[in-house]
Amino acid sequence: MITPSTIAVFEHVMKEFAAELREIGLVIDREPERIHEFLHMPSMQAINHMMIPPEYGGQPIVTIGNERYYGLSSLERVITIEKLAAGDAGAFLGGPGPSMSSIVMMDLADEEQKERFYSHFMKGASWAFFAMSEPEKGSDATDIGTRITRQPDGGIELNGHKIYIGNGSRARVGLVFAQTNRTPLGIQIALVDPSMKGFTATPLDTMGLCALQISHLKFEGFPLEEKDIIGRHLSPTKRGLWGALRTFHRMRPSVAALALGVAQAAYDYVLEHRSIFKEREKMELERMEMRLHSLRSMIRNAAAEIDHDAQKGYLASLSKIRAAALAEEATELALDMMGPGSMMEHPLLNKWYRDARAFEFMEGTTSIQKINVFQAYANGKMQHA
Ligand SMILES: Cc1cc2nc3c(=O)[nH]c(=O)nc-3n(C[C@H](O)[C@H](O)[C@H](O)COP(=O)(O)OP(=O)(O)OC[C@H]3O[C@@H](n4cnc5c(N)ncnc54)[C@H](O)[C@@H]3O)c2cc1C
């Protein structure tokens, strides 16, 4: 149970981890591969275990009395992630751990698949990818070109391209969305081992969140077995796209929390580095502070609502729309307040300004979130908010 005093303990623990991420943020922004030098840090070890249920070996990220928290609820995640992102969003995202793939695994995988997946993180730091987006079709989750085909000899093959996949080149296990036939129920999720033949991953050059090393993945005659299909024990309506939509609803408040963390970091930076402000500047900062507060409440409400009903994604969509915009505005405001040349003189602000531009795309763009909100309104779901 999360109470105001629990939140205070969470925030205190995360503040220490955030300080570590801040230390390495600029280094791994320039040289993402150097993340391997920092995996011994307590923050990285905690991130590696975040969202792993205890029955699969997960270690708590926070312990309060007899209560242990593993980052399994959306509310725990938004409190945690906001603080870590205020340290450095890139370092957090580029850090190890199962990340959003864990939600699919918890919801849809069978016991053998869960054991196989989580065991990667028990041996030490490891990464997982979640591969849905394809070249030029990221927003349309139903239009998937990657195919799972069954061969006459009984073998199963995976073929296709995925793009912008976080930690795609360093992951040792991954989930891939693919079609078996051209219907929404034909979408399946495969659990893959990237060390197998038929897989290549190329890191992409990006402007922001460079530590995340988003990558272009290719599957060419990649071998699968029946046991690699996630949710094979469930009915077709309860896996594939249905599972993906639940995952997106559950992860969306976390993306909003990431963006809020960056916005808060930029705001705090100005207060730390300047003490005298003109009246107009004071007003701008006060307005920003109020928006940060109100967004935090909105994100926490959205997370609590998703924990209660994973189908209710519209508040999460609204908070993601606001958070992506606020991160952009807050980083711009901070650069503006630090004066001419601030892009050169304040490398952290320069970095956060670049990082903030990525949130618009993660977990669905603003246009797609607006469609979600409109659909909830049109279906009458918003009246019960
Ligand atoms: C940092 C980062 C990390 C990411 N990590 C992952 C990951 O781990 N796994 C993964 O699968 N993907 C990942 N993505 C990809 C991300 O999910 C996609 O970028 C996103 O879904 C948008 O897809 P797209 O880039 O193909 O844009 P498009 O779908 O081509 O959209 C282009 C523009 O058209 C608009 N548009 C599209 N469709 C509509 C519509 N129906 N109505 C109105 N406007 C529309 C969009 O709003 C956008 O402005 C990541 C992206 C980033 C930036």
Image: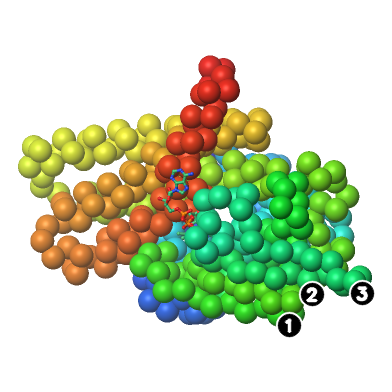
Q: Can residue 191 be seen in this view?
A: no
Find disc 3 in the rendering and name its residue. 153
Find disc 2 in the rendering and name its residue. 223
Amino acid at the residue labelled 1: Lys
Q: Which of marks 3 and 1 is nearer the N terminus?
A: 3
Q: In which quarter of the image is residue 176?
A: bottom right
Query: Residue at the bottom extreme?
Result: 197
- Pinpoint residue 227: horizontal percent, then vertical percent: 87, 63
Find disc 1 in the rendering and name its residue. 197
Q: Do the residues labelled 2 and 1 touch (CB within 8 Å)?
A: yes
Above or below, comparing residue 10 to residue 30 in the picture: above
Q: Distance between the residues labelled 3 and 1?
A: 19 Å
Marker disc for residue 306: none
Viewport quadrant of the N terminus: top right
Q: In which quarter of the image is residue 202?
A: bottom right
> For the residues carrying marks 3 and 1, which lies nearer the camera in this image?
3
- Pinpoint residue 236: horizontal percent, then vertical percent: 81, 45
Give the side of residue 220 with respect to residue 317, left or right: right
Above or below, comparing residue 171 to residue 352 in the picture: below
Amino acid at the residue labelled 3: Asp
As helix, strand or loop, the secondary structure at mark 2 comes to strand
Query: Residue at the right extreme?
Result: 153
As helix, strand or loop, the secondary structure at mark 1 comes to loop
Query: Residue at the top extreme?
Result: 383
Q: Distance between the residues labelled 2 and 1?
A: 8 Å
Q: Earlier in the sequence, mark 2 or mark 1?
A: 1
> For the residues carrying marks 3 and 2, which lies nearer the camera in this image?
3
Crowd around label 3: few <14 · some 14–19 · many ≥20 (10 Å):
few
Viewport quadrant of the C terminus: top right
